[in-house]
Structures are given as structure tokens and as C-alpha cells.
Image (cartoon, rainbow, N blue to C red):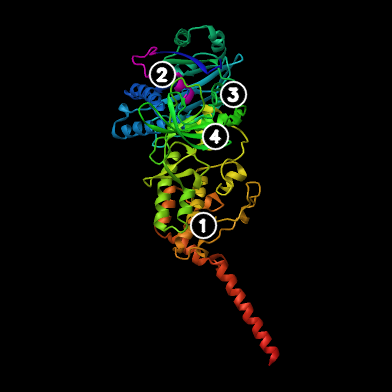
Amino acid sequence: MMKQMKLTLGGYSCAGNKDINQDAFAAKVPPSHLVNRKGVVAAIADGVSVSEQSQVAAQTAVTQFIQDYYATKSAWSVAKSAASVISPLNHWFFSHNQRNERSQAYVCTFTAFVGKGRQAWFFHVGDSRLLRLRDGKIRCLTRDHLAPFGGSESLSRALGIDSHLELDTKQFEMQEGDVYILATDGLYHHTSDQNLIDQLSNARHCDLEQLSETLCRQALQAGSDDNISALLVRVDDLPEAGLSEAKKLAMELAIPPVMKPGQKIDGLTIRHVLFSGTRSHVYVVENSAGEQFALKAPSAHFDDDLSYLEGFIKEEWIGKSLDHSNIMRMHARPEGSKFAYHLCEYLPGQNLRQWMVDNPRPSLNQVRDIIRETVKALRALQRNDMIHRDIKPENIIIDIHGHVKLIDFGTVQAAGLEEHFGHEKNATPQGSADYIAPEYLLNQTATFKADLFSLAVVMYEMLAGQLPYKTGASRYQIPDDISVWRYRPMRTVRSDLPNWIDLALERACSPVADNRPDSFSEFLEDLNKPNPQLLDRHEAAPLIERDPVFFWKSLSGILALACLALLAKDFI
């Protein structure tokens, strides 16, 4: 049985010698599928004493953070998920404070801990603290946001103080046996590191709620005059290092045998074979309700190839996490299935490669319509913190209704996916060499601009029937020097198209990522109307850059006339 991350939590909070407890904490260990996707969360907050409503701020901060964090997209990274929740919270508090007096302000410190896989993160503002006990030593992982004020110190940062929240965050590795302590100043100002070590040394065998209460009562006895809170997180088990969730699933699932029409798998009937190759087999299948799907199964050749099967499992996870009309839907396999396969939306139609064969000289409007639909799919990926990395005509489907669908998630990069399944370091760049962005190929780094580059190359090919760059036949022959990449103006083969379209494509598939548009919407705007800046830059450029063909033809003509003149002079 593969080990999973197991964290145990327990906390205690009391008003101490005060009438109102303005501290708050919350924690959640969700169902196992959410533990794998989003992790375990613990949070603590301390409301400022000058406000009569700070307890509302503290309680709201910890409970709303946890509730909203688990509602974020499963494909998002921990950092993106947390930031997308904390920033609106801060804005809400700040807006409330702008409308109310200081005594009614929503201001509090905030420290959150997220454990996922073998990794942990903290998100912190204010002077509550996250400490760690490891190997008999206490270490404070956060820093207090305090500034001198009137002979003492006051908070320089907290939720609700400013419209812009400057949040401390860090990712680090957990170890089995670690104990993490989230504490407010009422506790840590009145206890010592040695006392924490003594009390927590047997934490693995103790009830953490009772232990938290003991720490708080000791602080009260030591003279604490503030609210006192402690929240403990104990690391009981962690998954094995280097063994991703995808590898575990790949080891457990069997590759289906090659199937024929009429055979069944998991209650699905094979209707006909769409494709059968060395890497995979694709079938049209039908369930008991008469619904049809495409079933993609890996080839038996990869039965011992754990890396390939891991990628196959990742592709399924990505597909199921996406829900957009321009992206092929992927459905869950029947519960209890022992086989590795994808159950996908069935898309009768043709891929863009075949469409290009059927439409060798398409109109600009035809091409723009397809590109707009593809951009919608790429925006959906971007919202899910994903990059496709293999945009090419074969991965764009035009169904029988003319609707565009993006397929093939085997190369998709997703921050949340890497946290969930593990990150393959020094992985070879994926994607077709003809369409892959230079920075991804050369540096193994990709942003949405890599997808933009590939899409611009596809559009160029749709219009011109050729690629914009003369590169090698494989990724190993593509030049390392960006300056070698020379764009081939499209007007040499499509003089009927406006020059500003050529300029827009040249910009979008620039080999330098920073030169490309900063958003997909900016790219679409360049395709809908002339970009004055591009036109001005083009007109100001030397003739050899604006129109190299015309330049060399003109130069050749001038040289020919000069030669004729010299010959004529000799005969005079």
C-alpha cells in the first residue's frame, strides 16, 4: 500500500485575561481526493485590540480563507489558489474600513499553512507566527511585520490596513515527525523555545488539542495579558520521495488488450475502430444509454514504460479538470475500472491539417474565425494556470457543425498538476518542432506566449501554405541563435492579403517572447484592425527589412543597368 500524506491537527484559543477573544483559528482535513489536489489547510488570525470588531475580522479571515481555498480550480497551484482568496479578503476588509470609524475596523494578522504531498507553504502577514519543531530544534519560519511607533511597536502589515496586500509566502519540504505551531503573540511572548521543545517532544503520541490547551494555559500562568492561541500540525506520514501520484496509478492500472467491434470493456461496447497505431488505439464506444464516446487506450508496447503511462494518467487528470465548449471533454472512467484509458467526447469531423488540405487558399475571415475559437480554448487553459505547449493543426478539430475543439493534453503544463503528480525535472521539451516556441525549445521554459507563438505559426501556415521560418527538420537542427530566425513575409505568396495582417503575425510569432503581444486579446485586436505602431515601425524600417525581395530585385536591376551602361561605353 502506497503511503499518503497524513497530517494531524489540534488547537486551542482563549480570551486570557481579556473580556473578548479576538483571536481565531480554523483547520480542515478534507476528503482524500481533495487532500491530493488541494492539501490540508490550517490558519490563525489575531484581531487588533483598538477595534471592537477585530474578532469578526479574525474569524472571517480564517473561515473564509479555508472555504474559498477549497473552491478554487483543482488545476491551480497552491500559491495561486491562496493568493486568489487572500487578496479579495483584504480588499473587502479595506473597503469596510474606508466606510467606518477606526473602532469598527476589520484588521487582523493572518498566517496560513498548507500541506500537500511532501511540500508545505505558508502565507503570512502581521505578527502571528509559524514555528517548526524538527530534530529537537525550534525554528520560526515567519517574520513579524512590526514598525516602531510611539516608543513601542505596531503592525506595519496586516489584513485590512492597505488596499495593496504585501504577503509573505514560502514553499518548503516537510519531514515525517515535524510539528508546526501556528501561534499568536499572546502565546509566543510568554513561552520559551525550550518549553515548546519539552512539551512537543512527545507530540506524536499526544492529543494535539489537549497539548495546545496546555501551552496556552502555561502562557497565561507566565503572565500573558492578551488573547492566547495555538494551532498544532503534526506530520505523521508522507508519500515516498520521487514517486508521483501518476506513477502509482500507472503501476496499478492495466493496459486493455486490442479490441474489436462488438467487444465490451467496463460496460462500454466497441462500435468501431477510429485509429490503431504503435502508441495508442482509439475506438468509438457506446454505453447502455446509447451515448457515444471516443475511447483512447495506450498500446501494449508501453506496458513496461512507466514514464509513458505516467504521462497518460496526467493527460486524463488535465482533461477532466477542464470544462469549456472549445476544449474536448474528458469523462471519468466507470468507478472501479482496472484499465488505463481515456473516455473522451466523440468529435466527428476533421482536424485542421485536413481542413488546410481541403482549403489551400482560404479567405482571411475563414481563418480568423478558426483562430478566434482556438484562442477561446487557450484562454480557458490560461485561466486554469495551464499551457498547452503543442498547438499544431493536428490538435485542432473542426466538427461537422464547424465548431472548433482543442484536443491532446499530453504535453500540457499545469502548476497544480506538478504539485499533485510531481514535477519531472530536466524533461525534454514536448511539442512539434515546426510549431514549438524557441524559448521553450532552448530553455525548457514556457509561458502563454509559447502557445501564442505556435498559434501564430498555425495561422500563417493556414494562409500561406508554408511555415514562417526555415528551420531544421527536427528539434535538434533548430538554430540556437535567435538572430538566425528570419521571418518570411507572407506577401510573397499571398499578395491579396493586407500588409498589416502580415505584420501582426510577424509580431505574434517573433522568436523573442518579449516582442509578442502581452495577451491573446491584444493578438486578436491586431488581427481585426491595423496596429498603428506596427505600421509606423514598418514604414520607418530600411527597405531591406520592409521588403527584402523588392530590395534585392531593385538592386539587381540597378546593377544590370550599370553593367549595360559600361558595356555600351566600351562600344562607343
Pointer 4 local density, CA inside 10 Å: few below 14, some 14–19, many at least 20? some
Considering the image in quadrants, where does the C terminus appear? bottom right
Is label 4 or label 1 in front?
Answer: 4
Question: 433 or 193: which is nearer to us?
Answer: 433
- The residue pinned by badge 3 equals 243
- The residue pinned by badge 2 equals 25
Is label 1 or label 2 in front?
Answer: 1
Q: State the mark number for residue 280.
A: 4
Is label 2 or label 3 in front?
Answer: 3
* Residue 160 seen in the figure: no
First-in-chain label (1 vs 2): 2
Identify whether 231 is placed above or below 357. above
What's the CA distance linking mark 3 and mark 4?
A: 25 Å
Pointer 2 local density, CA inside 10 Å: few below 14, some 14–19, many at least 20? many
What's the CA distance linking mark 4 and mark 1?
A: 30 Å
Residue occupying the point 65% across, 85% down = 565
Q: What residue type is labelled 2?
A: Phe
What's the CA distance linking mark 2 and mark 3?
A: 33 Å
First-in-chain label (3 vs 1): 3
In this rendering, would 429 be left or right of 23?
right
Q: Which amino acid does label 4 sit on?
A: Ser
Q: What stretch is highlighted in magenta?
A: 14-38
